[in-house]
Image (tube, rainbow, N blue to C red):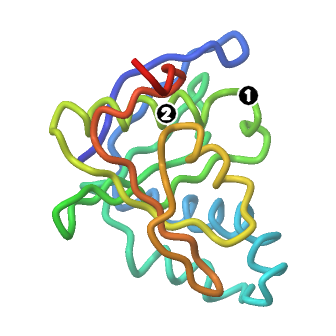
Amino acid sequence: MAVSGGSASVGHEGWVLRGAVAADVEVIAELRAAVMRADLERLGRYDEHRVRQRLRDSFSPQHTSVIMLGGEFAGCVTVRPAEGRLWLEHFYLAPHCQGRGLGSAVLRTVLQRADTQDVTVGLNVLRGSAARRLYERHGFVVETEDPVDVFMMRPPEVRTGAPASA
């Protein structure tokens, strides 16, 4: 499911999602290596070749959207149907685009589309990753954990920021 459209108050320019094409694989593989390096090193699992090859092996242009900010490549997100849910995968933002609300804006768009399909969204995040806080703010809860990954899910129609008792 490629996601399109959207805007956010990120700097002075809006963002858009465009469908990925096969030619995007290498720039996305490089982004993955850069974004995941610190967490993988902390976990003792960084391998310069493997971090890129895992993206290449699982790259699915038909399920991936490229995040463009002001006409420039800013990141990507994959939303793949499997096991009765949508899996949020390969959600990476270029370091200079992080911490400015872009990740939340993109995630809100993805989750709104999942809600219209009345489907649960699942993901996994590396243990200790700062990205986990982003997912928790958007209604994801832990299902299981292993020594490396935390598996999270979000049922449809979770309202972020709403009072717990309505």
Q: Position of residue 102 (x, y in %)?
A: 62, 30
Residue on which the image places disc 2: 106
Q: Could you tell which of marks 2 and 1 lies nearer the N-terminus?
A: 1
Q: Residues within 10 Å of mark 2 (few under 14, many from 20)?
A: many
Q: Quadrant of the C terminus?
A: top left
Q: Is residue 56 left or right of residue 103?
A: left
Front residue of 44/163: it is: 163
Residue at 74% across / 85% down in the picture? 46
> Alpha-carbon distance for marks 2 and 1?
12 Å
From the viewer's perspective, tell me whether residue 144 is left or right of residue 30: left
Residue found at the very far front of the displayed protein: 165
The spot of residue 74 in percent (x, y) is 61, 40
In the figure, 166 relative to 128: above or below?
Answer: above
- In the rendered view, tell whether residue 4 sits above or below residue 87: above
For the point 49% across and 60% down, the residue is 90
Locate residue 113, reporting x and y percent.
27, 33
Residues at circles 2 and 1 in contact by the CB criterion of under 8 Å: no
Q: Amino acid at mark 2?
A: Val
**What residue did someone put label 1 on?**
100
The residue that appears at 58% across and 46% down in the rendered structure is 136
Which amino acid type corresponds to the residue marked 1 in the rendered image? Answer: Arg
User: Quick one: 151 or 82, which is closer to the camera?
Assistant: 151
Give the secondary structure at mark 2.
helix
